[in-house]
Amino acid sequence: MTATPAVTDHVARFICATTYEDIPEKVRDLAKAHILDALGLALAGAVAPGSRIVQDYVADLGCAAVAPVFGTALRTAPRFAALANGAAIHAHDYDDTCPQHRADRNGGLHATGPVISAAMAVAGPAGRSGRDVLEAFHVGVEVGCRISHAIDNRHYAGGYHATGTINVFGAAAAVSRLCGADHDTVRTALGLAASHSGGIRENFGTMTKPYHAGHAAEGGTVAAELALRGFTAAKNALEAPRGFFAAAGGGFDPVQVMERLGHPWAFEDPGIWIKPHPSGALNHPAMTLLRKWVRVEGLTPERVKSVRLRTNANVVNTLLHSNPETWLEAKFSLPFNAAVILVKGRAGLAEFTDEVVKAPEIRSMMARIDFAAFDTIESGFTNTTTFVYVALDDGTVLSGRVDYPKGSPQDPMTYDEVAEKFQECADYANWPTDKAARIISLVRDFETLSDVSALTAALSGD
C-alpha cells in the first residue's frame, strides 16, 4: 500500500520557506491588479445590506478598535475586520476567481478576498510593509488554490462552496506568514483552519454566500492567532483518514499540492480571473460574446427572436436560479445575465437591483432564452466552454463558442482596466475622489510601501 503523502507538512514548509524573491516578477505584478480589484469591491460591498448587518454586529461587540472595516469609520479586532471586509468584497459576487484545472471539474475559488482581508486586518495594526503583505498574500492564495484543485470533485458537486470551505486555509497561511510562525505552529494553524471550514451552495443567492468569504477570512485569522498562542490541533489535518480531504471530499489528488504548490504559481496556471461583471463567473463566457454582438452587430432587444445557451452540466447546476426574484438570485441566473446584456447593453453594479430583475423588458427577454447543458464534454473544451445561438427576426442566426471570458488570463484585464472598475465601485459607494485616486496610486506601487497603514487610511472613513 502506498503511504499517504504528508500534505499538511508540505504545505506548512511552503508557507514558512517561501520568500518574496521566490515569487516570479510577473506573478508579483499580477497580484497588484487583483488587490486593487478586491479593495474596490470592499468599498462597494460595504454599503450592501448584508454588509451593513455584519458591521452592526461587529460594532456591537465593542472590541479593541485597531483594524479598519474598509469603506466605514468602524475599527475593531483583526478577526472581525477580516470577517467584515471579506464579506464585503464578496457582497456583489464581483471578486476574482481561480478556476479548476480540468474541464471535468468545477467549483472556482474566490481567491483574493478572504486572503487579503485577513492579511490587511493583521498587517495594518502591526505597521507591516507592502512587501510583507504581498509575500503573505501570494503564499495564501497559492495554498487555497492548490487545495481547491486537489480535493475530489465530490466536494463541490455535493454542495460545498469552496470559497468558504477551502480559502480558510489560504487566510490562515497568509496570517501565519505575516506573523512569522514556525513550521510546527503553521501545521497547527492548518489543523485549526480545517475545523473552521464551512459553506454550502444552497445559500447562493442570499446574504450568506458573501458571508462565506468573510467567515473564511475570520476563521483563518483566528486559527493562526490561536496557534501562535500555543493552541493545539492535528498536525496532519489535510490528509489524515479522518481529515479534511476525506471528510469533505472523500479523497484528493496529492499531485496538485505535492508537485504543483508554487510550480507553477496559480496566478500563472490555471490563472485567476478578474470579473468584468458582478455575477457568477460561469455566466461570463456567454456575456462576453453577447456584449460583443451588441456592440459590433448592433443587436437590439426588438431584433432578438430567441436565444439558446449551452454549457456543461456543472455550470447549469451552479447557475441554479432560472427565474430569479432578487438581485442576489440574479447573480446565479444565466438567463438574467444574458437578458440584461441584450436589453441594457451592459451589466455593472447598477444593473443588479431588484427593480431591474423585475423589469418587464428583462422578463420578456428572459422568456426567449433557452439554457441547458450540452450532452458531452469534448476534447478541447474548458470547464466554462459555452455555445451561444441568437435567432433574429429576419431569420439570421448568430452563433459562437467561448472557452474563456473577458477577465481570464486568455483575455485579461489590465491594471488600468481594473482601475476603471475600482472607480465604478468607489463611485457606487460615494467614496471621496481624492481617497479613491490615492488608493489606485498606492496599490500600483504596493511593494514600495514601508507601512500599509497609509493604504488602510485611504480605505477608512475616519
Image: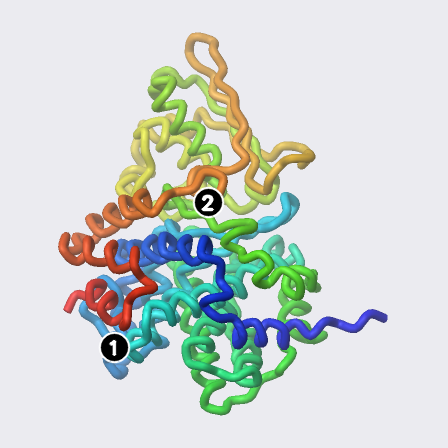
Q: Residue at x 50, y 56 (%)?
A: 109
Query: Which image quarter: residue 86?
Result: bottom left
Q: Position of residue 192 (x, y in %)?
A: 53, 79
Q: Residue at x 67, y 58 (%)?
A: 152
Question: What is the residue that sits farthest to the bottom in this orientation?
Answer: 230
Q: Residue at x 49, y 62 (%)?
A: 23
Q: Residue at x 43, y 83 (%)?
A: 225
Counting residues from the start of the chain, the first of labels 1 and 2 encountered is 1
In contact (CB < 8 Å): disc 1 and disc 2 = no
**Residue 322 appears in the figure:** no
Q: Position of residue 139 (x, y in %)?
A: 49, 67
Q: Which residue is mark 1?
A: 60
Question: What is the residue that sits farthest to the top in this orientation?
Answer: 394
Name the residue type under label 2.
Ala
Q: Nearer the viewer, residue 252 or 279?
A: 252
Badge 1, how many Cα within 10 Å: few under 14, some, many 20+? few
- Disc marking residue 155: none
Q: Which residue is mark 2?
A: 281
Q: Quadrant of the N terminus?
A: bottom right
**Residue 21 appears in the figure:** yes
Q: Position of residue 447 (x, y in %)?
A: 34, 64
- For this view, does 248 lie left or right of residue 117? right
Helix, strand or loop at disc 2? helix
Helix, strand or loop at disc 1? helix
Q: Quadrant of the C terminus?
A: bottom left
Name the residue type under label 1.
Asp
Q: Nearer the viewer, residue 276 or 49?
A: 276
